[in-house]
Every structure is written in structure tokens, then in C-alpha cells.
């Protein structure tokens, strides 16, 4: 694997204070330790992503997840401002379903690396107004940008835009399908929290029992999260899905989990497993339908819940009532630190697919 | 004509692979040959556009159309990324009528040349909400940008904004008026397809019969296209307007075509002329009213139509049913290549009016 | 006070023609004389604003208002394009109440100094759609930007976002609260118009009688304007509030004006004071409720009104009927010049709070 050196010249400086700018409350994560595990960052793994699209969490192997997380850790602890790793690159953010949080995190990622952003904050209002098809929009974007980040309410939109789009595509959420970059940022947070989860043999006292509230089969962020969890056999001791549904995994995910060595069980009462969970992954009530109020006692946690000491709560945000603000100032709040890593993991992804991994290689050598 | 050298210094590199990034389907156009006709690009013609507004296709002479197309060809085949021709310039895109396609092509044009964009994606929602007049908006934009690109549903908005606006204005479509940059990109595609159309004396076998579906008198893109076609006497053999309307050209265009040596005729059945047309210019059904379904057999072409061998179909896009997707993979599809040139012709226009033609002159000397 | 030199290197050039780009009509203001008063710009005053939020006009002392106005004058008369004072900085413009004018002036300010913009043009449509709280949005923006500019229809939103936001915040209008940067741009215009107003002892013939149409107690722009006026004792001879309301100042402002040496009186008929006013500050009828039509003769001025010779009219714009367009071409029109200074005063604010006052210090030394 040849990694081209980055043409621009400039200082690379370790940032004073780690991390760069932290979350205001909850667990503070230091990215430094993550850079040391698995023998350090293998830039070749990043370089192999050049011109690749990011569509489905299932496309990643464990080495890629770890390399992207380590690249994010390097970006979070390094001042790249004089280096301009995405100089000359244009990234289109095409959001046919509004999401300020995801859109801005991608756009901040691009701008902080000196790339340019072409923004479509609300594609429903504009492009589709004239009845334009997603395929035609894909053809249009070929000459407008070097990569396209798309969110769309239809699961099928991903395949449709790729019929004509030749630029690499990043799926930022497609209907009830996938949200792979959310899963990468989730695992970036988990790996900063417990770097040894990345080890080929994770020490027993570092292994985790994951509790997942929701239905991975129909909720894209949870689905993608579970997909990546399956890569961490030996580190994930067990997964418990907390759901009312008879088949919360759905057909595709059931097929994929079939051969996993990680035991997966389902319960409809979080209180039964609460004291054993190391990680509780929540999601917005919005995607659970309108049943939430009646499920209250069985699904809700707050600062008074009997959580396992040292356990953490994750949430992709934005939240509604399901994630109680009383948890914000507790040591169980990993969700603010999780969100604070979003820009860096997306920078790592963009650098890799836009062929600028050389900037990462250069930074490693200082 | 003094052309100031561009102050910034940097590499200018011919791009590997021509063109830079092509359309996915249909005719692929190589811009190189266009650079050789008419003795090559006359940068003085571009430089004369400094501080000029682009309002109406009727403002151009043939030399300017050709010079802008040749500059676009140079931009399409050259890597300007280290050169930053629009460094320090701010372009405002003020869209009071939503158009993702046109807005993004201008914004991509600016960003790829290292200019900055101030974007008003949907002016109806914002500026006008407080009842602000277009004149007052023009006064406001004087200090915000170095040039303004405006689209507006009212034909009169162009005159209104110019009452106070002192910065150069680019008309990106005004009601049923003009869309001059669309016409320039249309002719950029035609000139790449048949460079000899630019010759003072076009060889007979290169001359074209243009078929135009629609009513140029009330459809701005078609109107502007016809205006530029009138400059190419001796290259355009004939124009046929295919329309239901008694007077599809309207008063202004009838006046302008009166002295042209190009014969213009009108028919209400495309099938009568289909096998003789070299170029078929279509437009969105949206502007044809709600009669389309009943006109189907007389106005519709698809992959099964008996098109002249070597003939091409153009369309400003976005399309509806009038442009059948069965044509996409045929050699008649010029519309994808046409769209793929949008960014480059708009770059040429912006470089010229913002006084950076020196960057083009420098690139020619390599 | 240590002022760090700005790391980037480049030309600083006095612009040819002063000011840089002027308003199309009305009074033309030359910023040069403002740079000479009070012994010149004290950069230490700017540097003290590093990492400060701009929330309320009451937070400023007179020296800060003058230093920011002088920095704006320097920016208006100097070409900083090669200097890039905001290089590497990301500013988020979060507008939960649409305002093209204010948003674009901040964004133009950032882009012209080579900073980056993350834009939320209409926060109601996006972030809040999922029911996200303002506090959670504040937490989110911590890692996205280096400063946040927020407008919000709720007065309380300012306190709410600051619960989690650690980046400096600029209040661009909060409900019926404050609009401090508008007041700074208003005073920038007044100080360019009469630089001696900044003097410790303002000559008698330079002092002004301010007439303010509206209710400062409930109109944020007027409120902030009055707050700054209170700093100019000895320069402001008198303030007259022209209002129908029994208590137009409201409780907070009445408290603050209590100890002022500037006499403040109230009238409900502008005609009674019109010939004595040096400055008439108007505001949009929208904020006056629906009574305007019946108040017409007592509140309205136009080109036929008997205005004092040399007097000027100010307005934050956008306007409705209350500001007659017949005034635009008169020598009483200061509002166009006022608006034309918006970008420069906002540049001064951003440079100061983002810790780049060193670029101003460098420019002063040329």
C-alpha cells in the first residue's frame, strides 16, 4: 500500500490540553490511550478506503473500525489547522431529511480540515420540488463535489442515487436502513472509554455487557451499532435487547448474528438486567412509536436508577423524554462525550475516502 | 486591454484524463478541441467583462460566447486548485425561487476557485418575511458580496434590485424573462460537441438544424438559448420551434429574429421534423402548463423514436416525463454532458466579471 | 495586556478609495477621522474581550464601544484579504428566528476575514423539529464551532443555551431582550458621522439630541441603542422617546437611566420635537403592533417633513411603511450608511472575542 505524502506543508502541533474541546458534563474521555493499543494506527487500513463509499456498518472489519477510531483520536489531539488536509476538496451535504446535528458535524469536520462544503439543508424543499428523481440528483452531484453525504427518509434512496453517482457516497442515515457513521462515532466513544476493547484478547475485567433499548431491526442507528458490536467478539460478553417487539432484530440482523459467538438475548423489562449492564444504548422515543408513556417504568432510567457502578449510558441524540436530564451531571453520562467525538470520526472518514491519509501518516511521524 | 496578472502564485497543472470528471452516461465531450478554434482563446474579451452584470442573453456578441466557452474548456482541463483565482472574493447566491441545481452549480464554481459563498437558499422564507423590498435587499448586498447571483419568480425583480445594487449582478433566471448563464452552458456543450460551429465559416457538414420544443416567448431558458443561436448565422442552418402556441416566439423575440438570416419555422408535431433535426432542445413540462399528457404522441421522444443518426438531445434539467429515461444510455444523450459543464462555464463568467481574467491568461501560457 | 502577534504573514494595504464600498444613496461616511479621536485605537481594550460573550449592551463601557468602532474603521479602510485574521476559526450562525440581513452580515464578516461559517438559517425547521432543547443544542455546538451567533424569538433562550455552551456566544437578538451588536453598529455609524462624540469633552456644537420612536422597554434594538447612548454623557444632550405607551422604557431601563445625567423625556407626537432632533432613530412598525395606521400623522416623517438641517435618520432595517423611501436620496438618510457598516463592526467583535486582536495591532503599525 503506497500512501502518497500530502502536498501542502505546515506545522503539526500537539494540542495543549487533551481533549481539544471537551463536553461540558459527564465522563471526559482522553483519546491518547487509544493511540497505543493494537500496536498503533495502521495508516494502510485508512488508505485502502480511498474512493470507497460508506453505506452500511456491515461493510467494515474490526481493523477498519479501530483504525478510523485511532485516526479520530489523532485528529482530536493534534492541531491540523496549518496543514489543511482537505484543501481543494468539495463535500456535498445533501439532507432530504432535516438533521442539524448530523449535518453540522459533517460540515464542521470538513471546514476544520480546510475543505469546502456545498450544503443542501432541506432537500425536500428544493431539488425534489420540481419532481427531480434521486438518480438525476446523483448525476448532477458528480461534477459539483468530490464526495456526497446523504440523509434520506427512504431506505431505497441509497441504491437509487448510486445508479448515476460516481463520487464516493457517505450514508448519513437512510430510512429504516443504516447509519454507519453514527455507529463509528459510538464505537469511537466506547474505544476511548475502554481502549482494551480493541485488543485481540480483551482482559476479562474490561469486557462489557451491552444493553440496547429499542428495535435494531427497524431503527437504523441501533442496527448499525449492533453490526459493529458483532466485530468485537471476546470484548463484548453479551448483548441484551430491551424491547416490546417479538422479533426486535428483524430478518437481516438475525441472519447476521446467527454465527456470532456473542450471546444475544431479549427482555421487555430493563429493570431485570439494569444492575448487570456496563453500557446502555438508548435511542429517541420518536422511533419507538407512541407507546412510550405506558412503558415508562420498564424502560426508563434516571439518576435514581440502580445502575451498575462504572456503567455508562449512550444515546445518538437528539433526545426526548427517554433520556432523563438528571443523568447529565452523573458519571454515567457518556452521551455528551460520545457526541463530542462526532466531528473527529467524520474527519477520519473523509480524509480516508478522499485520499488524504498521507496527512495522517505525516502527523504520526512527529 | 491590460490584463492584470493574478497576485497569488501556484502550480497550474493539466489534469490527467480529459475531461476532469465526466457524466456517467451518454455522449462524453472532450473540451480540448474547442481551445484550438478561432485562433485560440482571446483573454481580452473576458477581461472586458470586468464589473459587468450578466442580465440577458441578448447582451452577448459571438466573440464573447466563444471566449467564455473556451475559458470554460480551459478550466475543465486544468487543475487550478493551487492557484485560487477567486481568493478574497465573496459571491452571494440569492435564490428567491428555489433551485438546487442552479444554486449548487454556482456555489461549486465559486468554492472550487477558492472564493467564498454567502448563500440564501430560499429567499421567500427569510428576507421577504419582514416585507423587505427587493431594492432594499440590493442595497444590503452591496457591502456583503463582490457579486450577486439572483433567481427570482418575478421578471421585474431584475430591474428592481439594480436600483440600489452597485455590485455586478448575474441573472440566474427571472420569471418568464431570461436565463443567460443557462444559455451559455448550453452553447458550451454544443461547442464542445461541434467545435467548428465557432468558425467564421462553418463547414457545411458541421452545420445544424435546431429543434426547440416549447414557447421561447414565455420560457426563459429557451428564450435565452434562441438569443444565442441567432449569433451563429452560417452555423445554424435552421431553427424549428415545436409548439402548440400561435405565436411561440412572442413580441420581443420576433422583433429580434426579424433580421436574422437563420430561417425559423414553427410546427405543432415534432414527428414531422424529427428525422432532420441535429439538436433537439427540450424543457421541463412544468413550464408547458398542464396540457402535456394530451400532447404526448406529437411531442414526446424516447429511445424508440426515429432520431437522426448522430443527433443529440439537450435539456436544462430538472426533467419530468417529457424526457424519457430510456434515452439516458443512448448516444443521443447530450443533456448529461451539458449539465456536467455547468460548473466550468459559471467559473469562466465569475472569473471574468470579478476581474481575475489574469489567472486565465497565466494558465494559457503554460 | 499581552497581545499575541498573528501567526500568518501577508500584506496589509490601505484600500484605495475610502470607504471600501459605500452605500448607494444618502450620507457617505468616511471612517478615517474616527481613527484619530481619543488618542487612537487602544488594542488592549479589544484584547480584553478574548473569549467573552456579547450578550447585553449593558455589558460595555464607553472605552469598549469606541475601541470596537475604531477597529471597525480600521477594517473598513484596510485590505486584510492577504492577512486572513480568522484563519482556522469556525463561527456557527444559529438563527431560530429568520433574519437574512443579520445572518448574512455576520457570515460576510467571517468569510471576508477567512474564517469558516456553519450556518443554521432556520433553526425552527431543523434542530427543534425533533424536540431538542436549547441546552442540548448548546452542548452540541461546543465541538462544532469556536463561537456561536444566535438569534432566538424567546428572550430566555440566551440563558438556556449558556447552561452547556462553553464557546463564546454572540446574541444577535433574543425576543424582547437585547440586540447588542445592532447597537454597536448604530454607534459605529454615529461615531463616523460625528467623531467628536467620542471625545471626553464633546464640543457643544457637536452634541446631539436623540429622538427615538418606539418603546425601548419591549423593542430589543431600541433598548440596546439607548443603553449605549447612556455611556455618552456630555455628548448626548437629551433623549426624547416618541411613544404612545405610558411607560415606554420599562422597569429595567428606567432603573438604569435613573442615575444618568442625560435628560430623557417622552412625547406622543414627533411633530412637537422634530425641528430640534439631530438624530431620529426609527424601527420597524412590526414591533409597534397594529396601531400604526391611526398614528400616522404624529409618527411619520418623509422628505417633506420639517427636519432640522443636518439632522439624520437611523433605522436598523428591514423597514416597512414607517420609513418613507422619499427620504432615501436626501442628506438625512444615514440608515444606508449605518447598514453599510454592519460587516465591519461585526468583524471587529469577532476578531476580539476569537483572540485575534494581534491582527489589528499589526495593521495599526503600518
Image (tube, coloured by chain):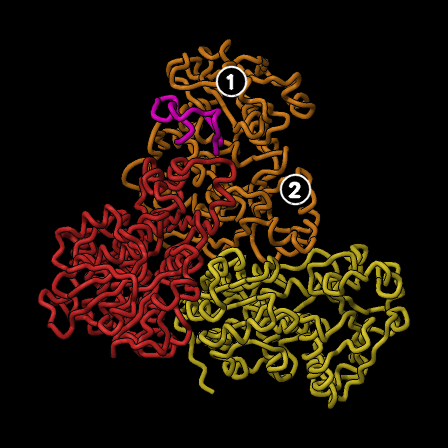
Chain colours: A red, B orange, C yellow
Give the x, y percent position of residue B90. 52, 54
Q: Which residue is mark 1?
A: B296
- The reply to whether label 1 and label 2 mark residues of one chain is yes
User: Which chain is mark 1 on?
Assistant: B
Q: Work out which residue is located at the far top of the displayed protein and give it.
A: B272
Q: Which residue is identified by label 2? A: B158
Is label 2 in a helix, a strand or a loop?
Answer: helix
Main secondary structure of the magenta stretch: loop
The residue positioned 20% from the left and 70% from the top of the image is: A34
For disc 2, the chain is B
Disc 1 from disc 2: Cα separation:
35 Å
Is residue B320 located in the magenta-colored stretch of the structure? yes
Residue B309 is tagged as: none
Q: Is residue A183 on the magenta stretch?
A: no
Q: Quadrant of residue B56?
A: top right
C37 above or below B364?
A: below
In the rendered image, is residue A257 in sight? Answer: yes
Where disc 1 sits, the SS reads helix
Rendered view: A132 above or below C117: above
Residue C283 is situated, as x and y percent measured from the top left of the image, at 73, 65
The residue lying toward the viewer, choosing from B116 and C7, is B116
Residue A339 appearing in the image: no
In the rendered image, which quarter contains the C terminus of chain B? top left
Whichever of labels 1 and 2 marks the residue nearer the N terminus, that label is 2
For the record, the magenta segment spans B314-336
Camera-side residue of A339 and A214: A214
Characterize the local packing of mark 2: few (<14), some (14-19) or many (20 or more) Cα atoms within 10 angstroms: many
Horizontal side, residue B224 vs residue A255: left or right = right
Q: Nearer the viewer, residue A362 or A347?
A: A347
Q: Quadrant of residue A226?
A: bottom left
Mark nearest the camera among 1 and 2 is 1
Location of residue B219 in the rendering, given as x and y in whole percent from the top left corner: 60, 29
Amino acid at each position: 500500500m503506497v500512501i502518497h505524502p500530502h502536498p501542502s506543508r505546515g506545522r503539526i502541533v500537539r494540542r495543549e490540553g487533551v481533549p481539544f474541546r471537551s463536553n461540558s458534563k459527564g465522563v471526559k474521555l482522553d483519546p491518547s490511550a487509544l493511540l497505543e493499543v493494537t500496536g498503533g494506527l495502521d495508516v494502510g487500513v485508512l488508505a485502502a478506503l480511498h474512493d470507497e463509499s460508506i453505506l452500511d456498518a456491515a461493510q467494515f472489519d474490526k481493523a477498519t473500525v479501530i483504525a478510523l477510531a485511532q485516526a479520530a483520536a489523532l485528529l482530536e489531539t493534534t492541531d491540523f489547522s496549518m496543514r489543511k488536509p482537505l484543501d481543494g476538496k468539495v463535500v456535498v451535504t445533501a439532507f432530504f431529511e432535516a438533521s442539524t446535528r448530523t449535518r453540522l458535524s459533517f460540515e464542521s469536520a470538513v471546514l476544520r480540515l480546510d475543505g469546502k462544503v456545498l450544503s443542501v439543508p432541506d432537500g425536500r424543499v428544493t431539488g425534489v420540488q420540481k419532481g427531480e428523481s434521486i438518480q438525476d440528483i446523483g448525476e448532477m452531484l458528480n461534477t459539483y463535489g468530490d464526495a456526497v453525504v446523504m440523509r434520506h427518509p427512504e431506505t431505497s434512496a441509497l441504491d437509487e442515487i448510486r445508479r448515476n453517482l460516481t463520487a464516493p457516497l457517505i450514508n448519513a442515515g437512510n430510512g429504516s436502513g443504516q447509519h454507519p457513521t453514527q455507529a463509528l462515532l459510538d464505537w469511537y466513544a466506547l474505544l476511548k472509554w475502554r481502549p482494551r476493547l480493541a485488543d485481540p484478547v480483551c482482559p476479562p475485567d474490561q469486557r462489557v455487557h451491552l444493553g440496547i433499548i429499542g428495535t435494531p431491526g427497524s431503527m437504523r442507528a441501533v442496527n448499525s451499532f449492533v453490526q459493529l458490536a458483532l466485530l468485537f467478539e471476546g470484548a463484548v460478553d453479551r448483548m441484551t435487547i430491551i424491547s416490546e417487539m417479538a422479533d426486535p432484530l428483524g430478518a437481516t440482523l438475525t441472519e447476521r448474528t446467527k454465527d456470532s459467538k456473542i450471546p444475544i438475548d431479549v427482555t421487555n423489562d430493563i429493570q431485570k438486567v439494569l444492575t448487570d449492564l456496563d453500557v446502555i444504548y438508548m435511542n429517541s422515543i420518536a422511533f419507538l412509536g407512541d407507546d412510550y408513556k405506558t412503558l415508562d417504568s420498564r424502560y426508563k432510567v434516571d439518576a435514581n436508577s440502580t445502575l451498575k457502578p462504572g456503567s455508562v449510558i449512550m444515546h445518538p441524540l437528539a433526545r426526548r423524554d427517554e433520556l432523563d436530564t438528571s443523568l447529565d451531571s452523573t458519571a454515567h453520562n457518556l452521551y455528551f462525550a460520545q457526541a463530542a467525538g462526532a466531528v473527529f470520526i467524520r474527519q477520519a472518514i473523509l480524509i480516508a475516502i478522499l485520499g488524504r491519509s498521507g496527512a495522517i501518516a505525516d502527523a504520526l511521524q512527529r
